[in-house]
Image: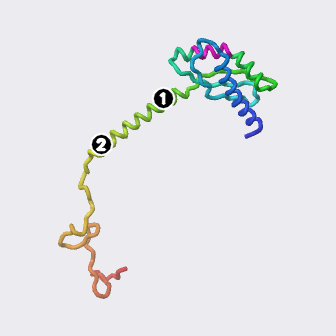
Amino acid sequence: MTETDARARRLAERIQVIVAETIERRVKDPRMGFVTITDVRVTRDLREATVFYTVLGDPTEQSDTGEALESAKGMLRTEVGRQTGIRHTPSLAFIADAIPETARHLDDLLRAARAADERVHEQAVAATYAGEADPYRHEDELDERGPEVAGHEVGRLDEAGLDEAGGASA
């Protein structure tokens, strides 16, 4: 991270605190709802700051709060300039943060995945084998012909270690 990026990050953090405190203490607009400043991003040249916010309430309250923030923008920018002491106070742009809607959408997706998982589990519990439950042969199930390997009889070894065909065993 370069020095410019670090400075922009520090300024963004400071602007977030200043704007949140100023809204809480000094903005008396009746349209202002319960607002939370979630993030601030400052350009590398420190000329523009984008302030992300969320509002608790219905869409009408959210739009009213957006209008109240726009009307208080000048006072908020003045306060940012006064408290930061930088030569050029960045212009402020307010954007409603999409985090709550995204979180709600992800929560809906997780619920749907859990429900699908439960349905799959129920089907698995009720499932039966297509063939036998254990398709492998066991020694106690071998017939009187003796052990078989892949459908062929295994040759018997004589005393010299040669099988019936005369080949040496390994």
The residue closer to the viewer here, 111 or 170, is 111
Say left or right for 38 vs 42: left
The residue closer to the viewer here, 31 or 145, is 31
The residue closer to the viewer here, 94 or 124, is 94
Say left or right for 134 vs 72: left
Could you say where residue 82 lies in the image, as x and y percent from the top left? 77, 22
Residue that protrudes farthest toward the bottom in the picture:
160
Amino acid type of the residue that numbered disc 1 sits on in the rendered structure: Arg
Q: Is residue 90 above or below residue 110?
A: above
Say left or right for 114 vs 66: left
Mark 2 lies on residue? 123
Q: Residue at x 35, y 40 (%)?
A: 118
Residue that protrudes farthest toward the top in the picture:
30
Could you say where residue 116 lies in the image, as x and y percent from the top left? 37, 37
Residue that protrudes farthest toward the front in the picture:
25
The residue closer to the viewer here, 75 or 25, is 25
Mark toward the viewer: 1 or 2:
1
Circle 2 crowding by C-alpha within 10 Å: few under 14, some 14–19, many from 20: few
Q: Is residue 58 magenta?
A: no
Could you say where residue 111 lies in the image, as x and y percent from the top left? 41, 34
Q: Residue at x 59, y 21 (%)?
A: 35
Circle 1 crowding by C-alpha within 10 Å: few under 14, some 14–19, many from 20: few
**Quadrant (top left, top right, bottom left, bottom right) of the N terminus:** top right
Amino acid type of the residue that numbered disc 2 sits on in the rendered structure: Gln
Q: Quadrant of residue 149?
A: bottom left
**SS at circle 2:** helix
Mark 1 lies on residue? 104
Query: Which range of residues does the magenta coloring cover?
Result: 64-72
Residue that protrudes farthest toward the left in the picture:
144
